[in-house]
Amino acid sequence: MDTSDPEITFDAEGVCNHCHEFDGLRGTQWFPDEVGRRRLEAILDGVRREGAGKEYDCILGLSGGADSTYLAMKMKEWRLRPLVVHVDAGWNSELAVANIERVVKYCNYDLHTHVVDWEEMRDLHLAYLKAGVPNQDVPQDHVFFATLYNFATANGIRAIFSGGNLATEAVFPRSWHGSAMDVINLKAIHSRFGSRPLKTYSTISFLKYYFWYPFFKKMRTVRPLNYMPYDKAAAIQEMTQTFGYKPYDRKHGESLFTKLFQNYYLPKKFGYDKRLPHYSSMILSGQMTRDEALRKLSEPLYDSRELETDIAFFCKKLRISRAEFDDLLAAPNRQHADFPTWDGRYRVAKKAQSFVERLLGRRVSVYS
C-alpha cells in the first residue's frame, strides 16, 4: 500500500496502519488454525440443526468468482443443503456462466437466478457514472445482497453464506469505497442523476439491515473462509481438478463491468489500483511475497487491444458514445459523502447494538 490511500499512516518503523489492523484480526475475526476449525464446525452444526426438516438449511450467493465457487464446493463436503442464488445484473462473462453451471451440476444444487431489469440497472449505472464517485460497483452489489435477503426471508432461512474473506480482502482503504449497503446514498445519487423510477430494483432499508434481519429475523452472514487457511491459488487448483473450474485473467473477471471498473476506471479517474490492497492482503496472509507482488504490479493492467474491445462493449451496452464515456472520466471526482449517507444512523445503530450485547452479556449470534 502507498499514499494513494490518503488515510494511510506509518509508525516509527515504517509499518502502516493496514498491517497493524491485520495483526488485530488474528484470533478475533481470522482463524486460519485449529481454533478456526473447531469454531467452523460449531457454526456448521448450528446451521444443520436450525435447518433440520427444511428444504434448505442455508443460502449462498454465487457469482461465479473463485471465492463463492470454492465455498459452494466446500458446502457439499460439509453436508449442507444450500439454496443457491445467482443475481444476473447484465454483466456476466461467458466464463462466469460456465463456471456456475459446472459447480452447480457437480454439487447437485438447486440454482435460482434473479435477472435484474436491465433498463433500471442501466439507469442506475449511468447515475453513478454521472455522480463520479469511486465505488461504481454499488448498483450490482446492493441488488445482489438485497436479493439474497429476500430469498432467505421467503424460504425461512437464517444463515447466509458468503465467500468474503480476510485472506484476500483484509486490507481495505476506506476512502476508496462507499458502502454497497447504504441505500440512502444509492437513492440520493439516483434521485439526482437518474431518469426513471426504480420499480423492481431490490433494496434493503437501514432499519431492515441493522435491526429487522439480525434481531427480529435472527439472520446472520457466515464467512467460512475466515475459519480456515484459505489459499486462493490452491483453491483454484482444487476446483480445476474437481469439476473443471476455469480461472479468470483478473480478480472479479466474472463481471465485465467490474473488470473495466477496477482495472481502468478507478486507476484512470482516481489513481486507485485495486491490486495494491488485494496483493497486500495476500502478503499478510502468507499467500504471496512482497517481491512477487511488486513484480505483478509492474505488469500492465490491460492489454491495449483488449481494453478498446471492453470499452466499446461497455459503451454499447449502456448506450453511450465513446466521447460521452471519456467526458464521464474527465468530469470532476466526487466522494460518496458528497451525497446523503446513512453514516450518522450507522453510528447510532452500532451503539444500540453494543448496548443490546452488553444487556445480554454476549455477542448477538444465531449460533452461540
Image (cartoon, helix red, strand yellow):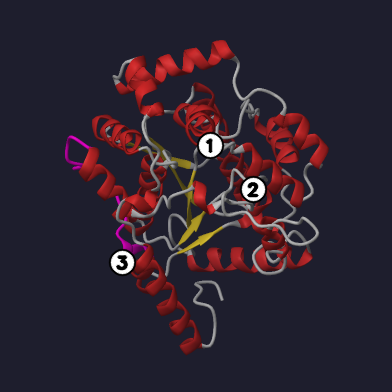
Foreground: disc 3 or disc 2: 3
Which of the 4 image quadrants contains residue 10?
bottom right
SS assignment at label 3: helix
For label 1, the crowd category at 10 Å Cα-Cα, with few meaning under 14, some 14 to 19 and many 20 or more, is some
Foreground: disc 1 or disc 3: 3
For label 2, the crowd category at 10 Å Cα-Cα, with few meaning under 14, some 14 to 19 and many 20 or more, is some
Q: Main secondary structure of the magenta part?
A: loop
**Residue at the spot x=70%, y=46% of the render?**
280
Q: Is residue 57 magenta?
A: no
Give the answer, above or below, for where 340 lies relative to 196.
Answer: below
**Residue 12 coordinates in the image, percent (x, y):** 78, 62
**Residue 39 coordinates in the image, percent (x, y):** 67, 68
- Cα distance in 3D space between marks 2 and 1: 12 Å
**Residue at the spot x=60%, y=34% of the render?**
251
- Nearest the camera: 31 or 183? 183
Residue holding disc 2: 74
The magenta stretch spans which residues?
194-209
What is the three-letter code of the residue carrying label 3?
Leu
Give the label on residue 211, or none: none
**Residue 223 coordinates in the image, percent (x, y):** 58, 57
Give the label on residue 207, or none: 3
Residue 70 appears in the figure:
yes
Which of the 4 image quadrants contains residue 311?
top left
What is the three-letter code of the residue carrying label 1?
Val
Residue holding disc 1: 104
